[in-house]
Image: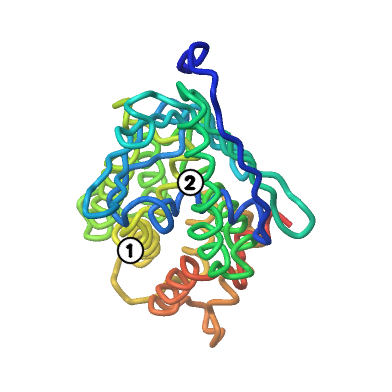
Amino acid sequence: MRPDLSDRPFEATVVHDTDASPEVVFRAWAHRFDEWFAEPGAIWMKPEPGVPYFFETFHMGTRHPHYGRILAYEADQLLEMTWLNEAGTRGVETVLRVEIEPRGDGSRLRLTHAGFRDEKTSAEHGEAWEFLLRDRLDPLLARSPKGETMTTSVRQQEYEMLFDAFDVDHDGQIGQLDLDVLVQRWCVALQVPPGHPAWNQITHKANRLWQDLIGHFDEDGDKRVSKQEWVDSHEQPGFVEKAAAPWAIGVFDIGDPDGEGRVSLQRWMTCQTVTGWDQAESLKMFQQLDDDQDGYVQRDKFVAYIEEFYSTTENRWWSQQQA
């Protein structure tokens, strides 16, 4: 529910142009806020409507807590939230709206901060926002790699494809049952029986993946993860290294139940088919990884690929399926 601002009609509006793309600007607000505004690490913010947030700033030896909740979210276009702190808004719940649109090769950001009791306070906030956008946000955007726009877009597409593969019942949510069903399908298709070391290993890694997901994102306690939550999870520190990458390698190990350190073409194609990947593209990927053409993909080669997958967007076979 939006706060009633009818008795607090004063607002500040700032229009700010930048050379950065809308995707990069939006990411600075939604995912990199503690790199230019909040105290690094002193933040909990999940860009999803209805979800509360908290962060701190540090000024002249004093910490300043900020509170609110997300009101609206449209990727690369809009972020709106309530905004409350003691020193700035005098304990009043205001509304901050950030709109981003393309402008030439860059972006135009329109910031509206509404709900102040008097013109003086709203004017002070307008001046503060002008300073912050110019002296804090712009340097961050200038440091962002030129290819970040494409990187963000490509990664999101790939993470969404992974989500669709894991959403076994196609209800738009991932639950633990989805992961359990997928693991069992792999094991049955590859003839890996319960209790086998490979079965135990992938089951353990699936549970770890699930616990990390709900640990970060199950705020309402429904034990379900949406597509946006899944995409956002990959931006959380440690999630890729501790959960996502070990999970992918664990899937590979199912296809190598005897621990030979390699997977045959037959087992590779079986696993990919069960997951739902296109067979032609799966074969193409196998051929790329089987560089000595002996009919096997070596485990160390696959591990190197997974590390590259999460660190670059070069040579992306999954994305090519969308072309």
Q: Earlier in the sequence, mark 1 or mark 2?
A: 2
Q: Residue at x 29, y 45 (%)?
A: 56
Judge left or right: residue 82 versus residue 159: left
Q: Residues within 10 Å of mark 1 (few under 14, many from 20)?
A: few
Which amino acid type corresponds to the residue marked 1 in the rendered image?
Glu
Question: Which part of the image, by quadrant, shows the C terminus?
Answer: bottom right
Q: Quadrant of residue 190?
A: bottom left
Q: Secondary structure at mark 2?
A: helix
Nearest the camera: 187 or 230?
230
Residue picked out by circle 2: 128
**Number of residues whose C-alpha sits closer than 10 Å to that of mark 2, classed few (under 14), some (14–19) or many (20 or more):** few
| Above-or-below relation of 299 to 227 | below
**Is 102 left or right of 291, judged from the image as shown?**
right
**As displayed, is residue 289 above or below residue 192?**
below
| Front one among 74 and 214 | 74
Residue 264 placement (x, y as % from top left):
47, 71
Q: Which residue is mark 1?
A: 241
Q: Is residue 170 visible?
A: no
The reply to whether discs 1 and 2 touch (Cβ–Cβ < 8 Å) is no
Name the residue at 50% across, 32% down. Answer: 122
The CA span between labels 1 and 2 is 38 Å
Secondary structure under badge 1?
helix
Q: Residue at x 48, y 46 (%)?
A: 128
For the point 33% across and 58% down, the residue is 237
Q: Position of residue 285 (x, y in %)?
A: 59, 69
Residue type highlighted by circle 2: Ala
Count of marks overlaid on the render: 2
